[in-house]
Image: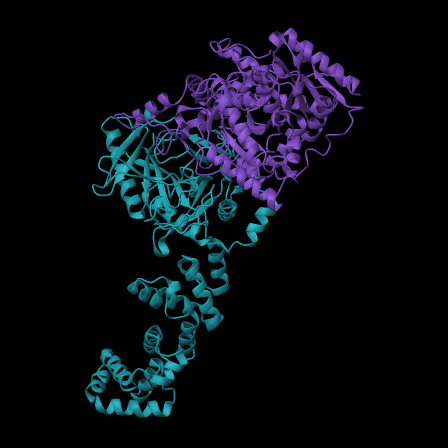
Chain colours: A purple, B cyan
């Protein structure tokens, strides 16, 4: 059984098909590991053994009958607690929604359930996905399985830690400014943020609507491709969902990389990147050249503006998106208040944490009369410039590569006192969100204190299959993605 | 000092779609609280809006009807504010780039042939969602929230400050009310809130160029209240200024019980709505093809129809405008004229606006519910025109058909024996009888009393039980009396 926790999704699928293991046994294996390790890691906010096993029995029945079986039927996964799940609590890492049970399933949850996957539980995250270290969760920080004194990254830190610790073979994540890729990098995993509009946002609690995108997190690119196949697709309930023909994201995995042109954005290799990260990324690029790729330096001249533009646009949208949490219909309501204004202010003051409040304040400010033009409109213009930079750079290359994060996982508290330092953790990931481009992170070695380093791949719009191909070929040639933290064996 | 009144109106017309503007919930009026509120309407976490295509079609129809520019690309924005019946904490509306720009309406102010015409310019019309309702009664100090109305599609129609009296404002509101119903985008039900107006009112000394400071009267849901509210507000503003107090920009409410307007909030309390484009919705793109497709499905518009009625049926401008008051009236008239013959169109118009309108009014019926069809009325009119029946008999036939007594005019005339006596021999005999029996009147007439002649006509008509042609009777009498 122990090799099952390190198996790929394809191997799990084969084992299930061959009846070497049942969905119930598989779910039980991971539930037991959650029981054993979650206390130390705090990756899960909610588990429900009975519900999980009921889903597993249902999957086993499908497998027995042989009807309605997909490559994912019977395989367990866990959802970031930002995805609404009918019958399970959906907290978004906030006191505001600590007891919220959604009456409906998010599109992504629906699709993965329809594919036969079994839900292990709901994963911890930064409150309303606002954070890069998982320290803003109302339910306490998630610990990095590679070193529990370090952060797992954020905001999908619970997803990353749970996979790294082999508490689940796969998880959903969301990425607004790097929230899939950065924790994947810090926990030694593979994570993919699709092109904006490829995965439906319906039922994914909105942080910054024009930037949010759900995506898969797993051990390998191959696993991510399988998961993305089930997650992607047009959803008429999301107006920003793209109406395109379905595609098999696994189709190009085995293509050789000879002739691949890798663009190296000059701006991603300058100051700010730690030496250990640079060293690991350099080795990975050497490996790619061995696989037949060529590298070319490209320019993204406006990328230096991406963090400031992001911290105008994302809080602006968030300040409006989070207005619905007013204590009127659901969520936290202050126990005592004298009038309506006080009900609002107390409920929100009590229900939201400091980082969420900070972003609501920033967002409210930049949208205010007299400041809108100076901040919000300027930021939108920068956004267009950033996208134009990518269009120009992609004329010279097929994918771009660079570090996912400027450093390996840092210690708890190291950046939480300085929001700007924390915001700079996403300096290499944010520009892809602003441009709507797909991005990936995959493990490419270890840096200081033997902590994982992530290599970022940025694809062209709708270049998911290409990115997955590029990542998979690397993973066939290396074994970083198979490494497992020592403390959770 | 003489004062000039300046009025601009903002109207919220609830659109006649099947479902809400951003969700699939029904918008039918009168349901139990919150049963027409879906996950999207109550703004659960994670839900997203999807624009209702029908609401856009309504906006296009309106734009076409008022000769406006329909924006090829318009943008939905979020208007942010907190209120318990606003579930998302923002209203989705259009701000910088509305779907309809410019255009205007012809209005007629005053009644009858002395009415004057005026063109009221529109600034814009934009799509937005309605909020829910706060219910302050029956909850023991608490407030109940009904979100059935949240997300109902509205078209907000904004005029330029073109109106100069409450009468003009009401005439505009009525013309707009008729138009939105004419093109089928709004049911016009003011009691249910389907059509409600806000009036921006200011006054300035006659001849002054600059506008005075305006106050906005909110939620006028009847034409009578609109007139009363504006009249009160105008007088109040004039008094304030004449007593040396400046008008301060404010939002006011009209209290129909006291007939007064009172301030709700001043400009200083105004919200900063923090408008920004809604990232959940793509810009609304309307192609020329789409506009053309909607246009093909549009009915003839009132102004065009009025002009056509004048030319085609030889009606006066006043008659034509009366008949075009509603689509149903115009359709009834046209059906009637088609059946009665073009040469009888004027007679049809008279009957539709006269006898029929009076009867409908008396019964409180809409013309669509008239028990008498346009074809049946045309049958009566044909028999008047060919002298088969007199006007008086025609009214009896009308009553009979109204009561369902007979299938058409001819059948009624036949059954009742109301055919006009046109046989001059038979009529002559009757006249002789009347003259013989009314010697006194004959003598009086001969003595120069004109009235006596009328009495003889009356007697003759009575003897025929109304079935004679009065002209024929007059001619015969004159001949017999040697006049």
Residue B431, image quadrant: bottom left
Residue A395 position (above or below residue B456)? above
Residue A293, located in which quarter of the rendered image?
A: top right
Q: Is residue A316 above or below residue B126?
A: above
**B346 left or right of A4 in image:** left
- At which x and y percent is residue B24? 47, 45
Say which of B392 and A102 sits in front. A102
Q: Residue at x 52, y 38 (%)?
A: A55
Please indicate, yes or no, whether residue A43 appears anywhere in the rendered image. Answer: no
Q: Residue B300 location, x and y as percent? A: 51, 56
Residue A371 image point, x, y percent: 46, 19
B438 is higher (above) or lower (below) than A214: below
Quarter of the picture holding the C terminus of chain B: bottom left
Does residue A84 appear to the left or right of B83 in the view shown?
A: right
Question: Does residue A485 appear in the picture of this structure?
Answer: yes
Q: Residue at x 20, y 41 (%)?
A: B258
**Position in image of residue A334 (x %, y %):** 31, 25
**Viewer-nearest residue: B97 or A447:** A447
Quarter of the image containing the N terminus of chain B? Answer: top left
Which residue is the extreme one toward the left? B440
Based on the displayed image, in which of its 4 quarters is residue B267 positioned? top left
């Amino acid at each position: 059984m122990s090799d099952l926790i390190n198996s790929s999704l394809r191997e799990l699928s084969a084992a299930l098909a061959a009846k070497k293991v049942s969905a119930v046994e598989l779910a039980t294996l991971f539930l037991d590991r959650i029981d054993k390790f979650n206390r130390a890691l705090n990756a899960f906010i909610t588990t429900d053994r009975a519900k999980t096993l009921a889903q597993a029995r249902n999957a086993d029945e499908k497998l027995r009958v042989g009807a309605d079986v997909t490559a994912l039927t019977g395989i367990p996964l866990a959802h970031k607690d930002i995805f609404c799940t009918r019958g399970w609590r959906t907290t978004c890492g906030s006191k505001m929604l600590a007891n919220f049970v959604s009456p409906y399933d998010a599109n992504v949850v629906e699709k993965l359930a329809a594919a036969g996957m079994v839900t292990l539980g709901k994963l911890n995250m930064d409150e309303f996905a606002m954070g890069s270290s998982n320290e803003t969760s109302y339910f306490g920080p998630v610990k990095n399985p590679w070193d529990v004194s370090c952060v797992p990254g954020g905001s999908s830190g619970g997803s990353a830690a749970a996979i790294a610790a082999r508490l689940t073979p796969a998880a959903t994540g969301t990425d607004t400014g790097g929230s899939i890729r950065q924790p994947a990098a810090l926990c030694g995993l593979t994570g993919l943020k699709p092109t904006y509009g490829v995965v439906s946002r319906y039922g994914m609690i909105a942080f910054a609507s024009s930037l949010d995108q759900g995506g898969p997190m797993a051990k390998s690119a191959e696993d991510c491709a399988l998961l993305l196949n089930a997650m992607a697709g047009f959803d008429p309930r999301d107006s920003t969902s793209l109406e395109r023909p379905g595609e098999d994201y696994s189709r190009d995995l085995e293509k050789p990389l000879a002739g691949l042109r890798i663009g190296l954005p000059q701006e991603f290799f300058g100051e700010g990147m730690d030496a250990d990260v640079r060293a690991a990324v350099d080795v990975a690029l050497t490996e790619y050249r061995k696989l037949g790729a060529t590298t070319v330096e490209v320019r993204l001249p406006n990328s230096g503006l991406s963090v400031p533009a992001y911290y105008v646009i994302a809080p602006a949208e968030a300040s409006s998106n989070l207005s619905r949490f007013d204590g009127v219909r659901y969520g936290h309501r202050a126990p005592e208040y004298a009038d309506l204004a006080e009900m609002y202010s107390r409920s929100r003051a009590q229900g939201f944490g400091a980082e969420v409040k900070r972003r609501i304040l920033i967002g409210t400010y930049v949208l205010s009369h007299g400041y809108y033009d100076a901040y919000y409109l300027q930021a939108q213009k920068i956004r267009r410039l950033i996208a134009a930079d990518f269009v120009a750079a992609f004329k010279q290359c097929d994918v771009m590569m660079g570090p996912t994060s400027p450093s390996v996982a840092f210690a708890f508290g190291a950046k939480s006192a300085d929001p700007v330092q924390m915001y700079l953790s996403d300096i290499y990931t944010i520009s892809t969100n602003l441009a709507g481009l797909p991005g990936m992170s995959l493990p490419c070695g270890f840096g200081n204190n033997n902590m994982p380093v992530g290599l970022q791949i940025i694809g062209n719009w709708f270049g998911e299959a290409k990115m997955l191909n590029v990542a998979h070929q690397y993973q066939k040639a290396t074994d970083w993605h198979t490494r497992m933290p020592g403390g959770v064996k | 000092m003489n004062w000039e009144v300046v009025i601009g109106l903002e109207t919220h017309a609830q659109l006649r779609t099947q479902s809400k503007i951003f969700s699939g919930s029904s918008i039918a009026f009168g349901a139990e609280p919150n049963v027409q509120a879906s996950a999207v309407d109550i703004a659960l976490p994670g839900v997203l809006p999807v624009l209702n295509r029908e609401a856009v079609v309504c906006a296009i129809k309106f734009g076409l009807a008022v000769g406006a520019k329909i924006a090829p690309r318009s943008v939905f924005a979020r208007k942010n504010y907190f209120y318990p019946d606003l579930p998302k904490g923002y209203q989705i509306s259009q701000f910088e780039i509305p779907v309809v720009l410019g255009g205007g309406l012809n209005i007629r102010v005053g009644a009858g042939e002395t009415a004057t015409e005026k063109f009221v310019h529109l600034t814009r019309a934009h799509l937005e969602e309605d909020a829910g309702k706060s219910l302050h009664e029956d909850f023991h100090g608490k407030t109940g929230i009904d979100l059935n109305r949240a997300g109902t599609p509205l078209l907000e129609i904004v005029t330029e400050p073109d109106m100069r009296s409450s009468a003009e404002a009401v005439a505009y509101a009525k013309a707009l009310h008729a138009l939105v119903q004419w093109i089928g985008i709004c049911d016009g039900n003011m009691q249910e809130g389907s059509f409600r107006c806000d009036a921006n009112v200011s006054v300035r000394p006659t001849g002054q160029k600059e506008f005075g400071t305006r106050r906005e009267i909110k939620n006028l849901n009847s034409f009578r209240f609109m007139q009363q509210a504006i009249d009160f507000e105008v007088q109040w503003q004039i008094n304030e200024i004449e007593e040396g107090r400046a008008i301060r920009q404010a939002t006011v409410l009209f209290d129909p019980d006291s007939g007064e307007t009172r301030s709700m909030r001043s400009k200083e309390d105004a919200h900063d709505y923090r408008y920004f484009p809604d990232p959940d919705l793509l810009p609304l793109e309307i192609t020329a093809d789409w506009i053309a497709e909607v246009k093909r499905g549009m009915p003839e518009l009132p102004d065009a129809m009025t002009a056509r009625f004048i030319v085609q049926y030889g009606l006066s401008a006043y008659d034509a405008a009366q008949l075009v008051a509603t689509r149903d009236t115009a359709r009834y008239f046209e059906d009637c004229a088609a059946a009665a013959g073009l040469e009888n169109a004027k007679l049809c118009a008279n009957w539709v606006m006269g006898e029929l309108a009076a009867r409908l009014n008396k019964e409180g019926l809409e013309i669509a519910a008239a028990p008498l069809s346009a074809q049946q009325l045309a049958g009566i009119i044909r028999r008047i025109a060919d002298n088969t029946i007199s006007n008086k008999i025609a009214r009896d036939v009308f009553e009979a058909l109204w009561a369902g007594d007979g299938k058409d005019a001819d059948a009624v005339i036949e059954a009742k024996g109301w055919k006009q006596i046109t046989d001059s021999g038979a009529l002559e005999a009757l006249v002789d009888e009347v003259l013989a029996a009314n010697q006194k009147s004959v003598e009086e007439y001969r003595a120069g009393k004109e009235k006596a002649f009328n009495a003889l006509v009356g007697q003759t008509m009575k003897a025929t039980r109304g079935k004679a042609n009065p002209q024929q009777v007059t001619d015969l009498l004159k001949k017999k009396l040697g006049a």
